[in-house]
Image (cartoon, grey):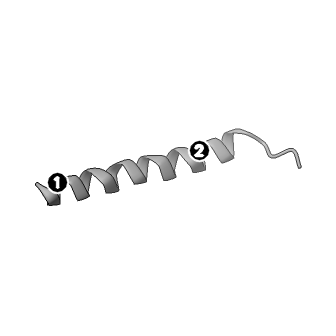
Amino acid sequence: MVGKLKIKFQYIEGIFRFSGIWIDSLVPRQK
């Protein structure tokens, strides 16, 4: 049960990291 939860958390964390990189590349920084 705890192992499944840890795998799920790593999966969600990976998605957030990937989507963050995708958003950074998609939206040009205007600073």
Q: Is residue 6 left or right of residue 1?
A: right
Question: From this viewpoint, which residue is outermost toward the right?
Answer: 31
Quarter of the image with the N terminus is bottom left
Classify mark 1: residues with Cα within 10 Å, few (<14), some (14-19) or many (20+).
few
Q: Earlier in the sequence, mark 2 or mark 1?
A: 1
Asked whether 2 or 7 is in front, the reply is 2
Q: Residue 4 carries which label?
A: 1
**Amino acid type at image mark 2:** Trp
Q: In this image, 14 relative to 23: left or right? A: left
Residue 22: image tag: 2
**Image x and y of residue 10, in percent:** 33, 57
Give the residue at the far front of this rendering: 2
Q: What element carries label 1?
A: helix
Q: Where is residue 19 in the image (x, y as percent from the top left)?
A: 53, 44
Q: How many residues crowd around disc 2 within 10 Å: few (fewer than 14), some, or many (20 or more)?
A: few
Q: Residue at x 48, y 47 (%)?
A: 16
Element under label 2? helix
Residue beneath the point at 15% across and 58% down: 2
Mark 1 is on which residue type? Lys
**Camera-nearest residue between 7 and 28:** 7
Q: Nearer the viewer, mark 2 or mark 1?
A: 1
User: Viewed as shown, does residue 5 lie left or right of 25?
Assistant: left
